[in-house]
Each structure stands twice: as structure tokens, then as C-alpha cells.
Amino acid sequence: MQIGISSYTYGWAVGVPGNRPDRPLNEQALLDRALRFGVRVVQIGDNWPLHELPTDRLAALRKRATETGIALEVGARGLRPEHLYRYIDLTHRLGSRLLRFVIDARGYEPDLDSVTALLREAEPTLREKGVTLGLENHDRLKAVAFADLIERVGSPCVGICLDSVNSMGAGEGLAEVVATLAPYTVNLHLKDFGIRRLPHLQGFQIDGRIAGQGMLNVPWLVGEVARSGRCRTAVLEQWVVPEPDMDDTIAREARWAEESISYLKTINGLTF
């Protein structure tokens, strides 16, 4: 699996709702960081909607990625028919082979029968365009629901984008999620985490950690996902605990990314 970085490696620098930096990270700066790290995969997620970029910026993104040997991966959210087909076309135009999708969006939570029907309908287009769709596990659906969905669609063009933390929001532990979804995984999100008891002892808090410094057993996870042979890329994502000052938060995020990539380069099964 090739190591990559993502727009979610730098969530604070890209900007989150209600917290947009004065000069947000752009797509060319993200490529700069990949080149500096010596990694050749860049995934641009739904926190940076590519369909909103002007045509000339999309063309410049593909041109530079091609010239520098960087494989682009595309991400989107809200699996509505028109949005899915828009992003299949966009993924193809950018020369990408992977389209990662979060099913739900704000005010939109389709039932699994509708999702299955949509993906079966879209499968010939995915195949024609040479695009693999990875559905990301998230906190509404259990892992078994995702596995059942992939089985019902029954196509090598449709698999799972396995996130190492998201399913905790559905009350599931990583071991059961990996056991269920690793065989279907086409893209891996490496996001380390910590769980700590709150000072008042009435509950726990889950937040991010530098890769290799939290509770995620990265070598085990990479080994389990590698068994199926379907997963080609492993992308660093981060939940960076913010500082009081946004500039300090963005600087902290950049330091975390450097340390995390240095660690991931030591893991057997990951290449760069």
C-alpha cells in the first residue's frame, strides 16, 4: 500500500465550518507537501469540494500531479444520483482511479435499498471510466450493514474506504470493524486516536494523536487490510486537538503530519 496525504491531513488548514483560516491551504500547496514528504498519493476529500473549483484550477491540478508522478484520489459526500455521476466524471477527468464517498450528508440519510439500487445502476459507468468507488464507514451504519451493501452490489468496482476511528461513533470497536470490512477495503484511512477519561470521571473523550503515538496498532491494521490484496493506498488523516489560537493549531497540525509520515514510513507493508 502506498502512503498518501489528504485534505483531511490538514483539516484545520483547509478550514472547518465556523473556523476558516484567512489563507486556507489550496490544492497546489497540498501537492507541495506531498512532494516534500516524498509520498506520491494525494486524496482530496469533501472538506474541499472539487466540483466547486474552476476548470482551469482542475486542469492545473491534473497537469502538475501527472508531471510529478502523484496519484490523485477524489472524495465526496452525499450519495445522491446526480452527485455520484458528477464525481465519477470528475474522478475520470483528473486521471484518478479511486473515488471515496461518504453516503450521508446534512439532512440526507438514504436507506440501504436505495443505495444498493443506485450503485448497481452506476456500476457500468464506474467500470467504463476505470473508477473504483470506496464507501467510507461512518457513525450511522454498522460495519455489517456496509458489508451487506457491498455483497449486494457484487462488483469489484465497489468496495470500502476503511476509516480507523469513524465506526466508534456507531458503538463499534476497531477489531470487529476490521474483521468485517477488511476483505472489502480498497482504501485505508490511517487516523490514530486516544481515549481518555474526563476529569469529572463521567465519561470518556476520543480525539486524535500523532500516528504511532496513540492507541491505533498501525502494523496490525495494515497487515489485516493487506490480506485481501484489494487495498492499494493508505492515507493519513488527522483529528488534531486544537490550540486556543488558530495559527498555533495549524502549526501543530503541520508538525503532527511530519511526525506521522516519518512513522508510517517505518511500517512494513507501506510504501512511498
Image (cartoon, rainbow, N blue to C red):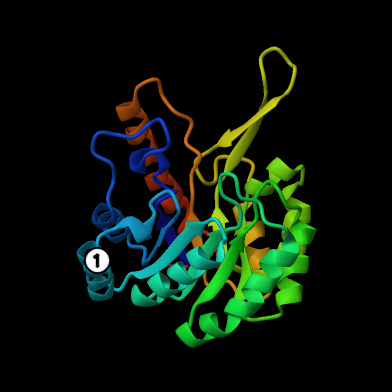
Residue at horizontal 48 percent and vertical 44 percent from the top? 238
Residue at horizontal 48 percent and vertical 31 percent from the top? 241
- Depth check: give the residue in front, 245 or 199: 245
Quadrant position of the C terminus in the picture: bottom left
Residue type for callout 1: Thr
- Depth check: give the residue in front, 146 or 162: 146
Residue 253 spot, x, y in % from top left: 39, 38
Q: Please tell me how many numbered marks the rendered image carries.
A: 1
- Depth check: give the residue in front, 232 or 269: 232
Q: SS for tag 1?
A: helix
Q: Residue furthest top?
A: 200
Q: Is residue 26 visible?
A: yes
Going by the image, does 28 lie left or right of 265? Answer: left
| Above or below: residue 240 compared with residue 104 | above
Q: Residues within 10 Å of mark 1 (few under 14, many from 20)?
A: few
| Above or below: residue 199 compared with residue 207 | above
Q: Dividing the picture into quarters, in which one does residue 62 lie?
A: bottom left
| Above or below: residue 250 compared with residue 152 | above
Q: Dividing the picture into quarters, in which one does residue 122 lie?
A: bottom right
Residue 28 spot, x, y in % from top left: 24, 57
Residue occupied by mark 1: 55
Residue at horizontal 34 percent and vertical 40 percent from the top? 13
Residue 265 spot, x, y in % from top left: 45, 59
Going by the image, does 68 lie left or right of 234? Answer: left
Q: Is residue 179 visible?
A: no
Residue 75 spot, x, y in % from top left: 47, 60
Residue at horizontal 41 percent and vertical 71 percent from the top? 91
